[in-house]
Image (tube, grey):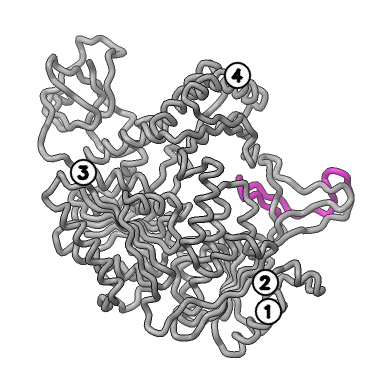
Amino acid sequence: MYAQIIVDISSEALDRAYTYRIPEGMTVNIGNKVSIPFGISNAYKTGYVIGLSDTVDYDPERVKEIKQVIHDAISVKEQLIELASWMSVEYGTTFIQCLKTVLPVKRTVRKNARRIDPLLRYANENDELHDLNVEQQTAASTIVDGFRACLGNDTTAVPRFLLHGITGSGKTEVYLHVMEKVIDSGYKVIMLIPEISLTYQTVIRVSTRFKGRVAIMNSKMSIGERYEQYMKCERGEVDILVGPRSAVFAPFDKLGMIIMDEEHEGAYKSETAPRYETRDVAFQRAKLSHCPVLYGSATPSTDIYTKALKGDVKLIELHRRAKPGSSLASTEIIDLRTELQKGNRSIFSERLHELITEKLEKHEQIMLFMNRRGYSSFISCRSCGQAIKCPHCDVSLTLHRDGILRCHYCGYEIPAMNKCPSCGSPYLAPFGFGTEKLESLVNKTFPEAKVLRMDADTTKNKGGHEKILEQFRNHKADILIGTQMIVKGHDFPDVTLVGLIAADLSLSSPDFKASEKTFQLITQAAGRAGRDKDSGKVIIQTYQPDHYAIVLSSAQNYKLFYEKEISFRKLMGYPPVEHLMTIQLLSKDEDMLTLICTKSAESFKKDCALYNAEFIGPLNATVYKVNDIYRKIVYIKHSGHDIIIQLRDRFSALVRDNDKRGFVMLNYDIQ
C-alpha cells in the first residue's frame, strides 16, 4: 500500500503530493499526521496523508517509507483534512477540490496595501455589553452551559442551538455575551455571516466590542488579504473570526463556539463545487472540535426548525423586542389588482403614496424594497413579440439607465438598439422594472426627497455598501431603495415606513422553496420598521394578497407558516421530509448532452426502482444555456440519506460509461 502525502498545507501546494510506501503492519488513514524522510538529505518532516492507493506509477524501489504515524493530539490541520474528506463523500467532489476549499491559498499582501478593514472606519463607541432582559439572559445562560459541558469531556454529544427571535429581539446581544464567556475561558469563536452587506451592523458591533481581537473576512478582499486574516487565526493573534461561509474553515486550534447568524440565508450555500451547505459543514467542524453550534434567525429554515422540533437541535425563543418601547410594525396588504381597477397605474399604491408623503413631511426615513435590479426587466418588440436575449445565455437582457443592455448571468452587454434584430421593427419597448427604474420614479414623484439606491450595481466597488448604509444612518437621505441587501440585519432607528413594491416576485420562481423564501423576505423587510420608540408601518403590495406566505409574513406568524409549509412538503415529498439530490449535467455540445443524459437515465431508472426512489428527468434547466454551456437536470428523491448518496454515485458511473470522451460535466446538490 502507498500513501499520497503533502508537506506544505496550503491549497496552492496540494497538487504536489509525494508518494510513500506504508510499511508492513502500519495502519494509515486519510488525514493522519506522519513523519517522513524528505528531500536529498532525508531529513524527517511532518506530512499529512491525503490519499491511499495499491499501486505506484514509477519504480517501487525508488519509493521511500513512512517512518511513523504521529499519534499526538489531533491538530487543527488534521481536523480540516478530515473535514475535507467528509465533504468529498457528502457533496460528490474530489478530495483535492475539497482540500483546496478548506485550506487557504498562500498569498502575501502588497507592502503598501492598506491592511485595516474598511468596516472599522465606521465603528461606533458601543463596546460595552448591554444588560440583557430576562429572555436574553435565559438564552445566553443555556448556550454557555452547553459550551461548558463540552470542556474536557469528549464523550458529551456536541450541542446545537437554534436562537429563534423575532426581528429586533436582540439576538446579536446574546451572541456578544456568549462570545465573551467563551473567550474568557481561553477558547476561540467563529462567527458566520451570510455576507457583509446583509449583516453590516452586526460586524461593526462585534469588531467594536472586542477591539483588536477580531479578524474580518469579506468577498471584496483580495486573496492575499483573506489569507492574512486566516494567518492571524492560526498564529493566535485574534480570538474571533467574522466572515461568510468560508470562515467555517478558520484554523483555530482551540475552537469553542461556532455562531451562524441568519442561518436561513441562501448565501450560505456554495454555488461552485463542492456545493456545500454551510449549516451542515459547521456541525461537522463542531464535532471535530467538540464545541457547540449556535444558529440564529428570525425566520429559520424549515430544515433547522424541523430538527429543533425533533429534539436534534435545542430551540431557544425570544418573543419580544429588546429595545424598551419598541414593538413590531403594523402592516397593510395592498391588492394591486384593486389599484388597477381604480385606475391607478402607478407602481405606488394610493396608500403607499400617502404614507411616503406623510413621513417625508415629518422628516422620518423610508425604505423601499424591490427584489430586482436594473431599469427594465427586458426589452421586447411590439411587432413580432421577441424579447432581446443574450446570445450566450437563455435569458433576456436587462436594460439599465445608462442605455446598456446587460446579461446578469454572464456579463455580456451591448448598447440599447433602435430596431428589432429579429424583424427590423422600430417598435421596441421596455417591460417590467427594477431598482434603477424605481429610483427614477421616486425622484420624479417625490422631487423633494433625497434618495439612495443599494443593489449589486451600486455596491460593486470595495466599501460601496458600507458607504451607502452610513450615509443613510447619518440622515444624508430620506429614502433608501434596494434589493434584499437593505432588508436584513440593519437597525435604523428613524425608519418608520417600509414599502415592498412587488412582494410576490419570488413566489413565481420555479423552486419548491418559493413560499419559504417569500415569507422570509417579507418578514425580514417588515422588521426594519419601527425599531425605536416611533411606531412603524409596512405596506406590502401584491397581486396575490391571499397567499399564505403573504398573509402570515404580514402577521409575523412563523409557526403557522411552518405548519402550512411543512404540510405541503410532506404532500410532495420535498426536503426536509425527504432528501432531494439534484444532478446537473453540463456540456457545450447540446446533441451529445441530450444523448448521454437519455442513455444514462434509461439505465438508471432500474436502480431507482430497486430502492423505491423517485427519479425525475432529464429536464432542461430553468435557464437552459449559460455562457454557451447547455444544462440539463435530473432529480432523485428518497428518505434515506445514505441511499441518496449511493444512487448519486451510481448515476455518475453510468454517465462516465456513456461519455468516454468527456463531453459532460456533473454538478451535485443535496438537500
Q: Nearer the viewer, residue 403 or 99?
A: 99
Q: How many marks?
A: 4
In the displayed structure, does residue 235 sit left or right of residue 166?
left
Q: Is residue 418 magenta?
A: yes
Residue at the spot of label 2: 334
Alpha-carbon distance for marks 4 and 2? Answer: 51 Å
Q: Secondary structure at mark 1?
A: helix
Taking the image as shown, residue 362 lies to the left or right of residue 246, namely right
> Which residue bears the numbered disc 4?
599
Q: Are marks 1 and 2 in contact (CB under 8 Å)?
A: yes
First in sequence: mark 4 vs mark 1: 1
Residue 535 pos. (x, y %):
50, 83
Asked whether the beta carbons under mark 4 and mark 2 sit within 8 Å of each other, the answer is: no
Query: Which residue has dot 1 on it?
Result: 351
**Distance Cα–Cα, label 4 vs label 1:** 57 Å
Q: Is residue 123 left or right of residue 498?
A: left
Which quarter of the picture shows residue 452? bottom right
Q: What residue does disc 3 label? A: 76
Query: Which class describes the residues within 10 Å of circle 2: few (<14), some (14-19), or many (20+)?
Result: many
Residue 8, image x, y percentages? 24, 35
Q: Write down the region rendered in magenta.
A: 405-424
Name which residue lies at 61% across and 45% down.
Answer: 410
